[in-house]
Amino acid sequence: MKLLKLLPWVALLGLMGCSHTKSSVALASMSSPQASSPMLKVKKEVVPYEVAMPSPVVMPVPMMMPSPVMAVEHNTEAYNVINENQFKEVSTSPLSTFSIDVDTASYSNVRRYLTQNNALPPKGAVRIEELINYFSYEYKEPQDDDNPFYINTSVGDTIWNKKSKIIQIGLQTKKPNIAKLPASNLVFLLDVSGSMGQPNKLPLLKKSLKLLVKQLRDKDRVSIVVYAGNSGLVLDRARGDEEQKIVQALEKLNAGGSTAGGQGIKLAYDIAGKAFIKGGNNRVILATDGDFNVGQSSQSALVELIEAKRKSGIFLTVLGFGMGNYKDSKMEQLADKGNGNYAYIDNLLEAKKVLVTQMSGTLYTVAKDVKIQVEFNPEKVHSYRLIGYENRALANEDFNNDKKDAGEIGMGHSVTALYEIILQSDEVKSKVDKLKYQTTSSNHSNELATVKIRYKKPDGDVSTLISKSINLNDKEIVLSDSNFAQSVVGFGMILRKSEHKKDAKLSSLIKLAKDSKGDDREGYRAEFIKMMEQAELLK
């Protein structure tokens, strides 16, 4: 009898003792690509990703009776692994080449983790370039129609490392004239599968698109394609001013079924092709949580289809929604391959920012295949590292290759890139021998670097080259913008636990951001400061 009375307590101790082991096993299983949802394959290469898992919940155990064992739903969000850029010595690597990126999905996703989940985001969710590019800066605009953007440059001290400097490069396009925008042929490709039934998914998606519809004109055309177990055409080429007709079609949508994403994308492109407007804005807008699990979604054929359609002038914008099974890694790749941008909608205010305030930048491309190449002067710069843009890196020879795909920039948008550099001095020691045939020119001894930009017109196949020298005393960018951009970078490095964060501390970054908030009309910078304060509490 005594032995029987002890059995419940033995079982309880066994459960408590093995709970950590079970969590570890589950974590290892979920972290494995083989155990997770199938990833998008590009040229048969599997892209590594990390899965965001919730922290184990420790429940108090009453002393008088065993507690019931609670089942915890696992988080299966997937993010690409990011290998942070390291310093490169100019003597051996004088060129830095990458594709521009105007996506902002990472920023609003990080915000969701901090403000809704009350948790720090996984490292893979933090793409620093997308945090920087979420904000607008007081950049100069191009003064003529020959170039789609103006190159702004500035050099200043680094706030987290007294031994380095920061080069800030800002590309700014012209502010749009809405009345002169070309006609749009928009196909809304909407995920109505069962996973979209949550309030922050399909219901938020409907409200978001209603905001966009209010901005459309009679010369615009709107079609709606949905996909779940099967794909189907809900609305075919309605005029942009038929707001009630479009809204009624949206209101009829309900979530249910599995996710045949591949079929839906094929149908959406077919409809966009039939409604194609020559010289207009032809675009598929995919709205989903990214959980494609039926059809050709895991096949490279899906990417090949998107790449082929972009060549015909039909671009792809991706809007992400929801949490729990969110597939960021897959959606970012789809937008990149479709010559489009990628945003994450975590609330209605973000929908307004993306689809109303910045509609022209989101939907109207002014330059495609935009590449940046920076050549550093070995007489002045010992080493450098590009902050962010890890998954946008290009081979140096790709800069002059017009067949190599790169990023797009929309009307009114800006792109910001920061380099951390170490200047040449007697204190700096090279890790490699100085090259015997290294060529330098004393005529350019005041230059730190030269930035070169290649871009194509939206309907063009041949690129145009523009360039600009960067000097140590460049101060084109106002100090408040430079400081605020550095506060954003510092925050991103802390979230990523970067080895380069040096003296960056949340307390000092918060103070810097407050001091450099400037004319924050939309309140985005104030919101960012609150995010940092929330992260400080969580840490």
Image (cartoon, grey):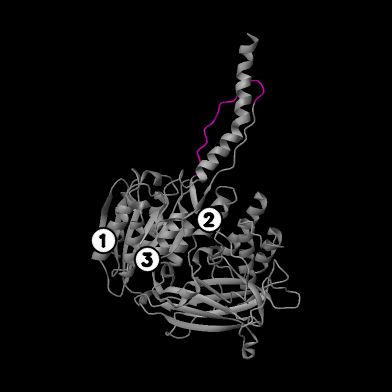
> Looking at the image, is 377 positioned above or below residue 16?
below
Along the line of sight, the residue nearer the viewer: 123 or 344: 123
Residue at the (50%, 71%) spot, across then down: 98
Q: Please check the rendered image and state whether residue 69 is part of the magenta-colored stretch, yes or no.
A: yes
Residue 255 x, y percent position in the rendering: 35, 45
Q: Which residue is mark 3?
A: 215
Task: Report crowding for label 2: few under 14, some 14 to 19, many 20 or more residues within 10 A (C-alpha).
Answer: some
What residue is disc 1 on? 270
**Residue under circle 2?**
81
Q: Amino acid at mark 3?
A: Gln
Q: What is the C-alpha distance between the residues marked 3 and 2?
A: 37 Å
Q: Residue furthest top?
A: 1
- Vertical comparison of 28 with 185: above or below: above
SS of the residue at dot 1?
Answer: helix
In the image, 144 versus 423, the foreground residue is: 423
**Residue 214 coordinates in the image, percent (x, y):** 36, 63
**Quadrant of res 384:** bottom right
Which residues are the magenta region?
A: 62-75
